[in-house]
Amino acid sequence: MARPDRPVMLVTGGSRGIGAATSVMAARRGYDLAIGFVSDHDAANRVVAACLAAGARAHPVRCDVADEQAVVRMFDETVDRLGAVTAFVNNAGILHRAARLDEMDVARLQEVVAVNVVGALVAAREAVRRMSTRHGGPGGAIVNVSSAASYLGSPNEFIDYAATKGALDSMTIGLAKEVAGEGIRVNAVRPGLIHTDIHESSGIENRVEKLAVNVPMRRGGHADEVAETILWLASDAASYVTGTLVNCSGGR
Ligand code: NAP
């Protein structure tokens, strides 16, 4: 069960990139962790080991967020092992090869929407069902990991991906208002170009370095810089902040 001194955080896609950085930083700041992953069990185990080394309790949880039942099981398993979840980081997301919209097939569009939109909505739903005071829960904070793509639009690369992040921004605003009176804050972070593996899916070599010249700060960001923003939004330090979209993008 939950230890009163250590709140429980669940991070989807916690095994690599921004989710991994958030998990390890959260462990160092006093949270117990459930680390979601879908295929890379070794990476999840490495993050779990780093969280354990920081004195946290931590468990890997396999869950493809596009699978509704897997999402329900992920929350149930986390509550069984660690206790009530009061911080949920809705982070899992994918993108495909850079292309124009007139080159994209429907299978691609359906997959990116299934993971980035339907998956995020179902996961947020499960978080609300467990956190909301209306359902007898303790309240909590949801942080959605959106993207600067939602306001840039990502022409010639991933309009599909950008559109899913626009949907996540709308969900953040609406859900925040829906549950503000039930002890839950809902916010989003919108990272810019961050050094993680996700860019490999684009097929563009060194994508972050190539595009960094267009970033006002003239560099890509680091996963830890996004993790700091996520952890602030999840924390009581942001107790009067809800429905907010925080850019973490070097001014881009
Ligand atoms: P990443 O390094 O590619 O890591 C992705 C993580 O998500 C991995 O843990 C992966 O698990 C997991 N994942 C992938 N598909 C999943 C699915 N269907 N269900 C559950 N988990 C899944 O990505 P990242 O760059 O850290 O991105 C994290 C979030 O930040 C995403 O929502 C992304 O859109 C957003 N973002 C990233 C950037 C950037 O520049 N990096 C910028 C803006 C927004 P496995 O390891 O098991 O595959």
Image (cartoon, grey):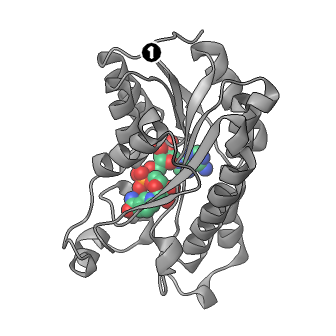
Residue at the (39%, 39%) spot, across then down = 22
Residue at the (41%, 32%) spot, across then down = 42
> Is 94 drawn above or below residue 19 in the view shown?
below
Residue at the (35%, 74%) spot, across then down = 204
Which one is nearer the viewer's eye here, 202 or 124? Answer: 124
Where residue 88 appears, as percent x and y from the top left, is 57, 37
Q: Can I make out residue 52 in this image?
A: yes
Neighbours of disc 1 within 10 Å: few (<14), some (14-19), many (20+): many
Where residue 104 appears, as percent x and y from the top left, is 62, 81
> Is 247 drawn above or below residue 233 in the view shown?
below
Q: Can I make out residue 198 in this image?
A: no
Where residue 31 appears, as percent x and y from the top left, is 43, 23
Amino acid at dot 1: Arg
Numbered label tally: 1
Q: Quadrant of residue 219?
A: bottom left
Which one is nearer the viewer's eye here, 166 or 233? Answer: 233
Which one is nearer the viewer's eye here, 197 or 82? Answer: 82
In the displayed structure, does residue 80 sit left or right of residue 10?
right
In the displayed structure, does residue 208 sit left or right of residue 64?
left
Q: Quadrant of residue 169?
A: bottom right
- Can you say which quadrant of the picture contains the N terminus? top right
In the displayed structure, does residue 198 sit left or right of residue 86?
left
Where residue 206 appears, as percent x and y from the top left, is 26, 70
Q: Which residue is mark 1?
A: 57
Which one is nearer the viewer's eye here, 219 or 38? Answer: 219
Residue at the (72%, 24%) spot, across then down = 137
In the displayed structure, does residue 234 sit left or right of residue 210?
right
Q: Is mark 1 within 8 Å of ligand 1?
A: no
